[in-house]
Amino acid sequence: MGNPRGFLDFERVEGSALEPEQRLKNYKEFYSLPSKEEQERQGGRCMNCGVAFCHTGIIARKSTPVSLKSALGVISCAEEKPSPISGGDVGCPLHNLIPEWNDLIYRGLWSEAYDRLSLTNPFPDFTGKVCPAPCEDSCVCAINGESVTIKNNELAIVENAFKSGLVKPFIPKKRSGKKIAIIGSGPAGLACAWELNARGHKVVVYERNDRAGGLLMYGIPDMKLDKSLVQRRLDILARSEIEFKTGYAVDSKKKAEEILKSYDVLVLATGASKPIDLQIEGRQSEGVMFALDFLTASTKSLLDSGKGAQIAKGKDVLIIGSGDTSVDCVAVALRQGAKSITRFERSPKRPQSRPLSNPWPLKKQTFSTDYGLKEAIAHFGKDVREYQKLTKAFVSKNGKVCGALACELEWRVVSEGAESRRISSEVSGSQKEYKADLVLLAMGFSGAEDALAGSFGIELDGRTNIKTHNYRASRAKVYACGDARMGQSLVVWAIKDAIECAKAIDKDLCQEHKS
Ligand code: FAD
């Protein structure tokens, strides 16, 4: 196999990114992969470890003492309903055959590399662009050096496959006669549709938005994932005989019953789109909005008219929250011409190196500066992040927001038996007013929309996600997958969950057929 000294002979080489001030002129992707020859060398950096962790896809749960825990200190195995957010990822949830395709590209066998990649991942064109790559944090090279460029290698393989005409529709030779409706066309709905269609079932996807793709289309901005690339994949699905009905919200009991009557199975892949709100004084002021509404309006304007929206133009923008969504808000607000940007987070600044509680091969929880934040530093000459800030009230004039009152938070660790947790308290006398005439709430999502339970006659769990057992919801013929079932997650997890859901449906339909 490959080059056993590759990681010693070649340094990690990433692609190149346009300088922030250059890329702020438009909403285009700004990252280019290295040359094909360089990418082949990068494939050669993979050591083909005896025990590779990059493709394990294990969830870390500190409280569940099983299998790997003894070997790794804190790791345990995935359960039926994993929570990648509260635990921590180890490697690729899709179990991508990473060492194999790394070696294949090192040997210049790009077509074979695509065969191996597409075996486990139906949409590497999405994950190669937007995945936070837990695989790279779990790479053995990363223990005391730089990981293999797994995400770039993946993207290079799939883009090469598109260029070479290897990415094709798949129409099964035989149809099962079963009809399946999928509600929601995000990565979960699409992956479930792809897998069920490949297994011979007729699939129809219902999407309430005017365009399919879920958060891949309206959520993740163009700079990270060009919408023509989402459409490129949607076209392949449509040419595989998957039917899409866009602009069709299944949002009432009547519509849900009609669909249930016409199909053998109904899959809810409706996402976790209930945003966490901040019900404090002044919340109803004009100019306080949810981050996703801001991002959706931006993408919609670009797609419909070719022009970016102007919501943040000339404004002092305050973003509350610290995840991916907040970074995307910073990047979009900059492109819209914000006067200033401030981002509040409640937590302290992360450490520069892994703390003991976050050992390799867990996904790294260290300080990093994502693309939008780098752009803001270049543009304003300072970091826009304010740590340990608690927003207490919004200040408004004539019904319009003009500021926010926030105080400092102090964090300390308290021990409760063997467990410990962090708690915060307000620093007295630290309250200050910050200027803001646009406030974007980016504090995450709290589960599936409330209306689902009533419309579909299903139960939600304690975290308001759809309650399932082996992907079956609490009503016959109804299944669920993706963020709607797991809670707010990642594209790679949505795809993984959807594939498992499709397998469970296929198995149930086969058993039904036999009996
Ligand atoms: P969604 O993508 O939310 O799709 C659900 C779809 O269902 C939507 O299109 C919705 O319109 C439709 N729908 C809902 N109800 C109905 C109904 N009643 N009738 C018809 N249609 C309905 N993850 C990453 O891995 N990397 C990133 O960089 C990243 N960035 C993100 C940025 C933002 C701003 C956000 C909000 C999330 C980001 N995520 C990222 C998370 C990721 O996008 C989600 O985990 C993933 O899209 C979930 O997939 P899903 O298919 O379950 O749901």
Image: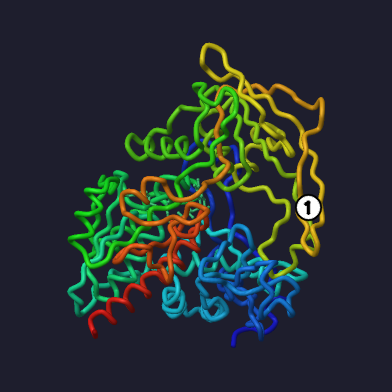
| Quarter of the figure that contains the N terminus | bottom right
Image point (68%, 72%), residue name: 75
Mark 1 Cα within 10 Å, few/some/many (few <14, many 20+)? few
Looking at the image, which residue is at 22% across and 56% down? 259
Q: Is residue 57 left or right of residue 246?
A: right
Residue projecting furthest to the top: 398
Q: Nearer the viewer, residue 356 or 171?
A: 356
Could you say which is closer to the camera, residue 23 or residue 97? 97
Q: How many marks?
A: 1
**In this orientation, does residue 159 appear?**
no
Q: Is mark 1 within 8 Å of ligand 1?
A: no
Q: Amino acid at mark 1?
A: Pro
Q: Nearer the viewer, residue 334 or 108?
A: 334
Image check: 98 left or right of 455? right
Q: Is residue 342 above or below residue 71?
A: above
In the picture, residue 232 is in which quadrant?
Answer: bottom left
Asked if residue 322 can be seen in this view, the reply is: yes
Q: Which residue is mark 1?
A: 351
**Quarter of the picture holding the C terminus:** bottom left
Residue at image x 57%, y 72%? Answer: 78
Q: Residue at x 33, y 34 (%)?
A: 305
Q: x, y (%) of residue 425?
A: 78, 38
Residue 272 in picture, x, y percent from top left: 46, 50
